[in-house]
């Protein structure tokens, strides 16, 4: 069994730009947790896998799009822990890409549904049909977005303590942001939605956090680059220059958007001089 690198390491980012702005910026390298179940994917899966094992359930079922990091990670986790996995995929039957091929190689059974059917993924009647088709399974929501997923993400701040003024995270379902929000002391949490119209994420975080905790959340909705899974040339150039400067690969869907936005805020003096910032690299490099 491959070893998980936990706690994940911290890396200080050093450059003349950051020095000129008097900003102390660190990166939490959750992308290094595991080669196939990296970043927040493992944090959201860990307690769910454990719960399934304790219940004696040997099959995991979850949902995702054709390029989903969560689908890829769940398939890898199933193989690692000798559990069957089923992925309910939004899209056309028979579609293939590297993500889905790898999921199948790791033993996941892919079941394609239409976009209309996919919208029913939380409805009792739809889930009952899946039980009739596949038998007993442990359900993990899309993106690992449940209470156990949030609890798993609380470990991020537990690993680093409270020595930072700001924390920065990219968000798709806001599960990771919710886990961090729960643990905030004096820190502020910057949340960068990776999809267009990400204002709803504040409401998602509110499901898991108190009003006092929510006051420390600063939503940054203007760095989605056109929407989920979409990119623009300036984002790709930023990824290349970031790798050249700091030796860290960023993913196209999440962390590169967050880091682009974070550097833009630093450039425009959003933070006071001397601020200590921790950005979380949530993995997802398989999507590149």
Image (cartoon, rainbow, N blue to C red):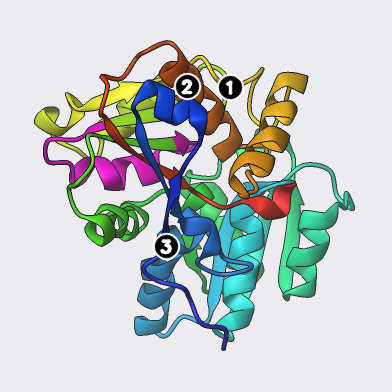
- Label 1 crowd (10 A; few <14 / some 14-19 / many >=20): many
Q: Earlier in the sequence, mark 2 or mark 3?
A: 3
**Could one spot residue 205 in this view of the protein?**
yes
Q: Residue drawn 83% across and 56% down?
A: 98
Marks 2, 3: nearer the viewer: 3
Q: Position of residue 94 (x, y in %)?
A: 89, 53
For disc 1, the marked residue is 224
Image quadrant holding the N terminus, namely bottom right
Q: Position of residue 161 (x, y in %)?
A: 20, 54
Q: Residue furthest top?
A: 268
Q: Earlier in the sequence, mark 2 or mark 1?
A: 2
Asked if the stretch drawn in magenta spans residue 110, the answer is: no
Between the C-alphas of marks 2 and 1, the distance is 9 Å
Instruction: Give the SS element for disc 1.
Output: loop
- Label 2 crowd (10 A; few <14 / some 14-19 / many >=20): many
- Label 3 crowd (10 A; few <14 / some 14-19 / many >=20): some
Q: Earlier in the sequence, mark 3 or mark 1?
A: 3
Asked if the stretch drawn in magenta spans residue 186, the answer is: yes
Task: Work out whether 269 lies above or below 103.
Answer: above
Task: Work out whether 151 lies above or below 119.
Answer: below
Q: Residue drawn 83% across and 62% down?
A: 101
Per the rendered image, the range of residues in magenta is 170-188
């Amino acid at each position: 069994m491959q070893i998980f690198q936990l706690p994940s390491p911290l890396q200080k980012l050093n450059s003349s730009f950051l020095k000129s702005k008097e900003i102390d910026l660190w990166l939490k390298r959750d992308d290094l947790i595991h080669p196939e179940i990296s970043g927040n994917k493992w944090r959201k899966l860990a307690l769910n896998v454990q719960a399934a094992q304790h219940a004696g359930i040997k099959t995991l079922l979850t949902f995702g799009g054709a390029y989903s990091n969560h689908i890829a990670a769940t398939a890898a986790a199933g193989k690692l822990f000798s559990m069957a996995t089923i992925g309910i995929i939004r899209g056309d039957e028979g579609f293939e890409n590297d993500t889905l091929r790898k999921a199948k190689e790791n033993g996941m059974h892919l079941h394609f549904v239409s976009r209309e059917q996919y919208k029913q993924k939380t409805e009792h009647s739809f889930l009952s049909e899946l039980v009739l088709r596949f038998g007993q399974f442990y359900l993990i929501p899309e993106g690992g977005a449940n209470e156990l997923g949030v609890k798993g993400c609380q470990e991020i701040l537990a690993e680093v303590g409270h020595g930072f003024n700001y924390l920065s995270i990219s968000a798709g379902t806001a599960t990771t942001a919710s886990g961090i929000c729960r643990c905030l002391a004096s820190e502020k949490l910057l949340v960068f939605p990776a999809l267009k119209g990400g204002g709803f994420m504040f409401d998602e975080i509110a499901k898991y956090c108190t009003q006092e905790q929510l006051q420390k959340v600063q939503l940054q909705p203007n760095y989605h680059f056109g929407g989920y899974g979409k990119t623009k040339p300036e984002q790709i150039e930023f990824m290349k220059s970031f790798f050249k400067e700091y030796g860290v690969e960023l993913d196209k869907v999440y962390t590169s958007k967050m880091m682009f936005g974070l550097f833009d805020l630093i450039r425009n003096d959003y933070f006071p001089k001397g601020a200590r910032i921790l950005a979380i690299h949530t993995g997802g490099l398989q999507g590149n």
